[in-house]
Image: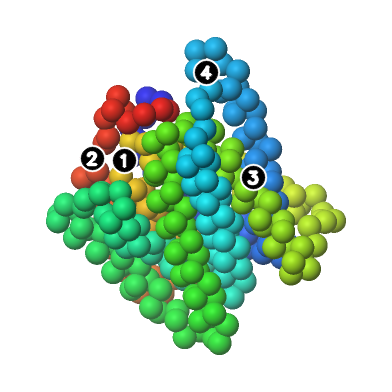
Amino acid sequence: MRLKPTAIVAIGVAFTSLSSILIRLSDAPPLAVASWRMVFTTLLLSPLYLRERLHRGHPPRPTGRSALALSVASGAFLALHFALWITSLSFTSVASSTVLVTTHPVIVAIVGFLLLGERVPLRRAVFLVTALAGSVVLVWGGLFEGESHAFGNLLAWLGAVAVSGYMLLGRIVRRHLSVNTYTMICYPVAAVLLIGASAVFGVRLSPYPAREFAIFIALALFCTLLGHSLFNWALEYVQTTVVSTSILGEPVVASVLALLIFAERPTVTTLIGGAVILGSVYLFMTGARIVDSSRNGPR
């Protein structure tokens, strides 16, 4: 790719911002939405994976047991993330849910430092803190909108914990596997686990009208392949904290779309918090240290 890794991350943020809107437009149960999203993602990704495996200039690399195990674990975290976060949108607002689920940079930064030795310079750490402070301001105005709101907020926050594990494991695995190989393990695992959870909780996966399947495919194509997969690619070139903090821009874009589509009018705190997040994310990203790809394993 000729674009800078930080530009790729920004494109991924734009596409992932569509997730909450598409989910809100769906009438299917949350687990059904999550299951079909990962099923279609796996199907759409398969040709890319096969092309990589058959390309003569890029012979397949061996997948070690540790890399395989970590990829499976990453898929489990991804399944948990989607199950929790998509369900949260049934109980709370788009702004609250997307903000809470993107508070994971704190978890990622701490664990990334302890396990991966990733360091965040003081100047960039300040921007990370101000971005999170903006998230708190954004969500604060809607905390007392109803009894179900608190439950939805809790689910969204637990979704943030789950996605932190997914991103950290992805950072480790991507040192040894290409992005297509990694996601071709991770995504099917997530799909199988979500289908299993649907069976356990009695959630039907069919039949649904064509409109619903159009939403499922859009979630897979735009929000996962052109969102999460771009993040997976970028993890080879930038630190985990850069990717995860950049995703803080998602609630701002999603909130604007929710206003236009669902008439979810933003409060003053939403506007202030959004401005702080966007400014902090921009300053954080401009200080990102691009990792030298020649020293960083396979692409």
Q: Earlier in the sequence, mark 4 or mark 1?
A: 4
Q: Residue 293: percent from the left, percent from the top?
A: 31, 28
Q: Are marks 2 and 3 in contact (CB under 8 Å)?
A: no
Q: In which quarter of the image is the C terminus?
A: top left
Q: Residue at x 43, y 49 (%)?
A: 169
Residue under the image location 80 percent in, 49 percent down: 210
Q: How crowded is mark 3: few (under 14 residues within 10 Å), some or many (20 or more)?
A: many
Say which amino acid is labelled 4: Pro
Outermost left residue:
122
Secondary structure, mark 1, is loop
Residue visible at 56% across and 55% down in the picture? 76
Circle nearer the N terminus (1, 3): 3
> Which image quadrant: the N terminus?
top left
Which residue carries the number 2 mark? 289
User: Would you say 227 lies left or right of 291 here?
Assistant: right
Inspect the image, locate mark 3, and give the three-letter code of the amino acid beneath it.
Pro
Q: Distance between the residues labelled 2 and 3?
A: 32 Å
Q: Is residue 225 left or right of residue 267?
A: right
Question: Label 4 belongs to which residue?
Answer: 59
| Residue occupying image coordinates x 50% and y 25% | 61
Where is residue 276 shown, x and y percent of the image?
28, 63
